[in-house]
Image (cartoon, rainbow, N blue to C red):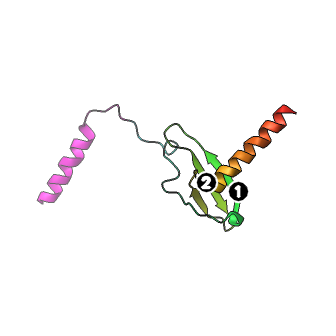
Amino acid sequence: MDSKVVALVALLMLAFWSPETDAKPISLVERCWCRSTLNTVPQRSIREIKFLHTPSCPFQVIAKLKNNREVCINPKTKWLQQYLKNALNKIKKKRSE
């Protein structure tokens, strides 16, 4: 028998007979959607904005552009901060009426 085949069989046997651990696989839900963010995105090219906040990830802003591309925007961008401030003010006004 070839030594490579013997090594492969030994590794497979070790993998099948190893004791189970308490480790759990990382689900796709727990992964952060945004791995990198953009600071400059033309506001005219944005069709839709989504906000995601999960326990294991920081606040994430995802913009769907008119060309159907999705990009992550830095939440600390000035125009986005102003947009969020205006949106919160509108919500507060509607609740007080």
The magenta segment is 1-23
Q: Specify the amino acid type for callout 2.
A: Ile
The percent position of residue 29, horizontal first and vertical second, equals 52, 43
Residue 1 point in image, percent of width and height: 11, 58
Q: Is residue 89 left or right of residue 33?
A: right
Q: Residue furthest right?
A: 97
Q: Secondary structure at mark 2?
A: strand
Q: Residue at x 25, y 43 (%)?
A: 15
Q: Is residue 14 above or below residue 67?
A: above
Q: Which percent across, then down, holds residue 78? A: 62, 54
Q: Earlier in the sequence, mark 2 or mark 1?
A: 1
Name the side, left or right, on which 87 lies relative to 24. right
Q: Is residue 71 left or right of residue 43?
A: left
Location of residue 9 in the rendering, given as x and y in whole percent from the top left corner = 20, 50
Residue ID for mark 1:
48
Where residue 2 sits, quadrant-wise, is bottom left
Which residue is pictured at 78% across the width and 36% down the height?
A: 92
**Front residue of this view, candidates 54 and 42:** 42
Q: Residue at x 11, y 58 (%)?
A: 3
Classified by dominant secondary structure, the portion drawn in magenta counts as helix
Of residue 23 and residue 30, the one placed in the foreground of this image is: 30
Residue hosting label 2: 62
Residue 1, can we see it? no
Badge 1 amino acid? Glu
- Write the residue at 48% across / 39% down: 56
Q: Is residue 77 above or below residue 69?
A: above
The quadrant where residue 54 appears: top right
Which one is nearer the viewer's eye here, 94 or 69?
Answer: 94
Crowding at dot 2, Cα within 10 Å, few <14 / some 14-19 / many 20+, comes out as some
**Secondary structure category for the residue under label 1:** strand
